[in-house]
Amino acid sequence: DIQMTQSPSTLSASVGDRVTITCRASQSINSWLAWYQQKPGKAPKLLIYKASSLESGVPSRFSGSGSGTEFTLTISSLQPDDFAIYYCHQYNSYWTFGQGTKVEIK
Amino acid sequence: QVQLQESGPGLVKPSQTLSLTCTVSGGSISSGDYYWGWFRQPPGKGLEWIGYIHSSGTTSYNPSLESRVTISLDTSKNQFSLRLSSVTASDTAVYYCARKPPQYGLDVWGQGTTVTVSS
């Protein structure tokens, strides 16, 4: 099975900060990776697919990069609406999620 | 646009079978090239993939749950269903259904339904 490891688990940041979350796969997943944002009591929301493609309607301050085993999600200028939990998701072989990264207010 | 809605009992007794349905509206479940998946999230924890069924009827399950899981399509009702047998308290979670186009992420999600396993 492919394991996905996200870091950090928690990230404290201020509005306007540049934020980067990393996701590492236990083996190559090519570019078959997505990122989601989840707020309390809500379903996850797709942000990025195929490692770097921005989902329609998602603000351009969100970007994704990487291939193979190492991936990043970057928020270029953190906004109040961005405080949430972020998950990576590989769909190269079966499907697996990272454990999540909570972005909290500093 | 396509919408998904989970339904089913909110309380299941230990050792029994959990059964949930995801109703798809705004599009046909059997047309197009889509994967229809089930996921769960225990209280305060992360997301876990349970399994999926493709529009063609092909299934794939999380190896850690495979022995207890069945996912099926009901094209006449535009629904897909989850059955999880021999449940224990550790199966208590919010259960979600979602759609995934090929090469894409999970682009449409249901709102989730809470299932508690307790006697």
Image (cartoon, coloured by chain):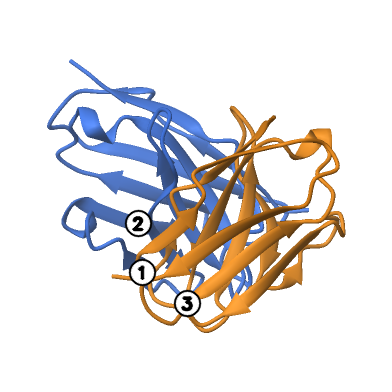
Chain colours: A orange, B blue
Q: Amino acid at mark 3?
A: Thr
Secondary structure under the numbered disc 1 in the rendered image = strand
Give yes or no for contact between labels 3 and 1 (Cβ–Cβ under 8 Å): no
- Residue B8 seen: yes
Q: Is residue A76 above or below residue B112?
A: below
Q: Chain of mark 1?
A: B
Which amino acid does the dot numbered 1 rest on? Thr
Query: Is label 2 in a helix, a strand or a loop?
Result: strand
Numbered badge on residue B59: 1
Viewer-proximal residue among A41 and B13: A41
Q: Mark 3 falls within which chain?
A: A
Residue A17 x, y percent position in the rendering: 80, 45
User: Can you see residue B77?
Assistant: no
Camera-side mark, 3 or 2? 3
SS at mark 3 in the image: loop
Residue at left offset 30%, top offset 61%: B62
Q: Badge 3, how many Cα within 10 Å: few under 14, some, many 20+?
A: some
* Residue A4 % position (x, y): 41, 62
Q: Which residue is mark 2?
A: B71
Query: In the image, what residue type sits under mark 2?
Result: Ile
Are dots 1 and 2 in contact, CB under 8 Å? Answer: yes
- The mark tally for this picture is 3
Q: Which residue is mark 3?
A: A69
Rendered residue at 42%/65% (across/down): A95
Residue A25 occupies quadrant: bottom left
Query: How far apart in space, not on screen, are marks 3 and 2 (Cα)?
Result: 30 Å
